[in-house]
Image (cartoon, grey):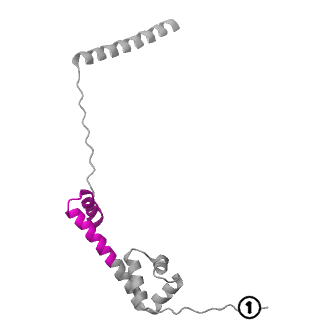
Amino acid sequence: MFHSIPFTPRNVQATESRLKAVYDAAKLGLKGDTLALAAGMLPAEYRQLTQIDPVVEMAAQKGKADGEIEMANIIRKAALDGDAKMALEVLKHQHGWVAKQAISVEVDQRISITGALAEATKRVFDVIDVEAKDNAIDHIQR
């Protein structure tokens, strides 16, 4: 037995209120399915509406642009008001600035003449000891 399921298709139109909802959601930085749901539409309805009416896509682009302008103005104002961290972020992200990374190595080593002579003398005696041992071994083996 077949039961009838009542179905009423939703009428998808680019009304002024729907365009405003799309604009507001895009201004917050939402995209795709999230934008559609925030604007009160199903994702499929939003995609269908963007294909039917290009004004919907324009509302989303305008909302995104206005949101970026607001944030850019806030960041710029903070940098101009003396926020050094924000100024560095602007330089890095907007102007491609990279801080120089230099390594400075300083070696301050003092040489003691008496110490150097003692080390040299020790090495000479070590070499003489090795030669003396080698001579003794050669003499024993003969």
Q: Is residue 78 above or below residue 60?
A: above
Relative to the observer, which residue lies in front, 117 or 105?
105
Q: Residue 110 appears in which quarter of the rendering?
A: top left
The residue drawn where x is 24% and y is 36% is 106
Which residue is located at x 30 percent, y 17 percent?
119
Residue 106 or residue 140, whichever sits in front: 106
x and y percent of residue 51 in the render? 47, 90
| Residue corresponding to mark 1 | 3
Residue projecting furthest to the right: 1
Is 117 magenta? The answer is no
Position in image of residue 123 (x %, y %):
34, 16
Q: Mark 1 packing: few (<14 Cα in 10 Å), some, or many (20+)?
A: few
Where does residue 65 sit, x and y in percent of width and height? 33, 78
Q: Which residues are drawn in magenta?
A: 66-95
> Does residue 88 show up magenta in the picture?
yes
Amino acid type at circle 1 is His
Label 1 element class = loop
The overriding secondary structure of the stretch rendered in magenta is helix
Image position of 78 with respect to 138: above or below: below
Q: Name the residue rendered at 26%, 47% in the picture.
A: 102
Q: Is residue 130 above or below residue 101?
A: above
The part of the image, by quadrant, that contains residue 83 is bottom left
Camera sees residue 142: no
